[in-house]
Image (spheres, rainbow, N blue to C red):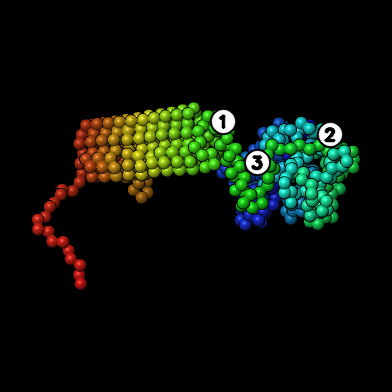
Amino acid sequence: MNQDIVILAAGKGSRMKSALSKVLHAIGGVSMVRHVLTTASQLNGVNLHLIVGHQGEQVIANCQDFSANIVWQENPQGTGDALRRVANDLSKNGSTLTLYGDVPLIKQATLEKMQSAADDNTLVLLTTFLDNPSGYGRIVRNAFDQVEAIVEHKDASSEQHQIKEVNTGILLAPNKHLITWLDKLTNNNAQGEYYLTDIIAMASKEGLKVVTVHPESVAEVTGVNDRIQLSWLEREYQQEQARALMAQGLTLLDPARFDLRGSLVVGIDCTVDINCIIEGDVTLGNGVHIGPNCHLKNCTIGDGCEIKDNTLIEDSVLEKGCVVGPFARLRPGTQLGAQAKIGNFVETKKAQIGAGSKVSHLSYIGDTVMGDEVNVGAGTITCNYDGVNKFQTHIGDRVFVGSNSSLVAPVAIDDGATIAAGSTITKAVAKDQLAFARARQTNKNNWSRPVKSS
């Protein structure tokens, strides 16, 4: 069967108290609607349809890489109204799966289970059981335990309010029946809306089989209406990712204090301490240790590296055995050779630092190519910017840079050179030379300190 998937993403979400469309709020750093589209696109042979309304242009821009058919639902009048607007785009002989842009954690396996239960004369519902079903549509069954209808909470009787099985809103229907049912929907209900759920009674009346499928967890089918629900689903999502990584052998010292907002590939025997954020695409080699409160974004960390507390690494590559931090910042374009060391309060940017080189504390190294076994003293700055343009500093192998030095780019320091502490270097330094550039010290005898004027 041809598989249409309709994703409803037109609502404003007023309870979010936000200028941003509800479906654009993020779980794990990715908009909710993108989570749904990603899962839907993993099913075989699907045609994606995205229903947009409030801030539709922003939603479309956020999801344009999925190449979904865009259908506008301005002045929305319920879920049935949304499906009616896309009816002409549905395959006449296929089936339609309805999903929601604010229900982000639905699993591919659950949707495949729904597909396996479907045929031309079967409607498949995704239902779940809640201890407190208030607000949800109830699944009404007959004496033979067959689904007869879905009754919305506001339209349900006191007896129906006692039903624990509820509608998730996710259903799979054969199009040859669905298109006809949509045309028959009315808005004669407490909300004055067109309920997609009314097609269940139509299917039952026409003798179609209505079957139910259940998700693995309530989190899969929980929608977001406010910030509280958003935060709850964020933790559910993060816990799921943490469990998956630990199953691969990663040690998380506290899985409840871990955030993955992208993808993480780990080698064996890696450890991540508390309150770490992994963003973008991050790869850890074997035996990597990440200290607490670190933020890694789009980086590759080689075997045996140690990232100490409170360190930020972005768009950088570290070869094996590097030690970075605490309180270090590696900005985009940083490359560290094997066994390199970046210490506390050191910032790097577009810096290629060779094997075994050390920048141990309180320094800025930017737009620099540095050789192997270089030792950079505290307070060293590569002065790479003249207010308009950036310039590069070249440092050879085995160079020693004394503390509190300024290297004014463009400048080159050859192998084995030594820069005396407190120097401002503006000219090239040849191999094995000593360079010093500082004012001559003058000491005055019998100096009288100034006194405070009365």
Circle 3: element type: loop
Q: Which residue is tagged 2?
A: 120
Residue at the (74%, 48%) spot, across then down? 133
Q: Which residue is tagged 1?
A: 247
In this image, 363 relative to 127: left or right? left
3 or 1: tag closer to the N-terminus: 3
224 or 434: nearer the eye?
224
CA–CA distance between discs 3 and 1? 20 Å
- Marks 3/1 in contact by CB < 8 Å: the verdict is no
Residue at the (47%, 33%) spot, across then down? 271
CA–CA distance between discs 3 and 2? 28 Å
Q: Quadrant of residue 31?
A: top right
Q: Quadrant of residue 334?
A: top left
In this image, 431 relative to 40: left or right? left
The three-letter amino acid code for the residue at tag 3 is Leu
Circle 1: element type: helix
200 over 121 or under it: above or below: below
The three-letter amino acid code for the residue at tag 1 is Ala
Q: Which mark is residue 105?
A: 3
User: Residue 295, image x and y in percent?
Assistant: 47, 42
Neighbor class of circle 3 (other Cα within 10 Å; few <14, some 14-19, many 20+) is many
**Closer to the camera: disc 1 or disc 2?**
1
User: Residue 327, image x and y in percent?
Assistant: 39, 43
- Give the farthest residue toward the bottom: 454
The three-letter amino acid code for the residue at tag 2 is Asp
Q: Quadrant of residue 384?
A: top left
Residue at the (55%, 29%) spot, across then down? 248
**Closer to the camera: disc 3 or disc 1?**
1
- Marks 1/2 in contact by CB < 8 Å: the verdict is no
